[in-house]
Amino acid sequence: MTAAMTKDELRATVLRVLGDIAPEADLASLEPGVDLREQLDLDSMDILNFVVGLHTALGVDVPEADYPKFATLDGGVEYLVARRPCSSTSSSPSI
């Protein structure tokens, strides 16, 4: 994932990847707490392509066990927010 993306940037990336998977979808009318599969008529291959697209766009690995966290727009964004790099965290300086 690129360095310290904001929540809004992550949401925009999720929406862009969803638009690639479901180009006919009206992403502006998505309800953030409602199942994406129902709203966009996604099947299991679409979900897999969505997760692969997020990996490509953000460099984040999503284990299969975590796929259900992407059931809703809000759930997916919150998952990515929790996994983004912290810009204030630093390891001991190298000398």
Image: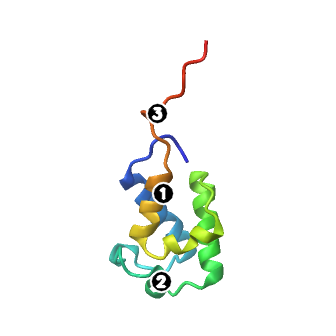
Secondary element under disc 1, as helix, strand or loop, is: helix
Q: Label 1 vs label 2: CA separation?
A: 21 Å
Name which residue type carries label 1: Leu
Q: Earlier in the sequence, mark 3 or mark 1?
A: 1
Please name the residue that numbered disc 1 is placed on: 80
| Residue 32 horizontal side relative to residue 70, left or right | left
Around disc 3, counting alpha carbons within 10 Å, would you say few (fewer than 14), some (14 to 19), or many (20 or more)?
few
Q: Quadrant of residue 20?
A: bottom right
Q: Label 2 vs label 3: CA separation?
A: 38 Å
Residue drawn at x 57%, y 68% as measured from the top left: 66
Residue drawn at x 46%, y 80% as measured from the top left: 36
Which-is-in-front pick, marks 3 and 1?
A: 3
Asked whether 61 or 31 is in front, the reply is 61
Q: Which x, y percent locates residue 93?
A: 55, 19
Q: Quadrant of residue 62?
A: bottom right
Please name the residue that numbered disc 3 is placed on: 89
Around disc 2, counting alpha carbons within 10 Å, would you say few (fewer than 14), some (14 to 19), or many (20 or more)?
some
Q: Residue furthest top?
A: 95
Which-is-in-front pick, marks 1 and 2?
A: 1
Around disc 1, counting alpha carbons within 10 Å, would you say few (fewer than 14), some (14 to 19), or many (20 or more)?
many
Compared to residue 69, the image places residue 5 above or below, namely above
Name which residue type carries label 3: Thr
Q: Earlier in the sequence, mark 2 or mark 3?
A: 2
Name which residue type carries label 2: Leu
Secondary element under disc 3, as helix, strand or loop, is: loop
Q: Label 3 vs label 1: CA separation?
A: 17 Å
Compared to residue 57, the image places residue 15 above or below, namely below
Q: Are marks 1 and 2 in contact (CB under 8 Å)?
A: no
Please name the residue that numbered disc 2 is placed on: 40
Q: Which x, y percent locates residue 70?
A: 50, 71
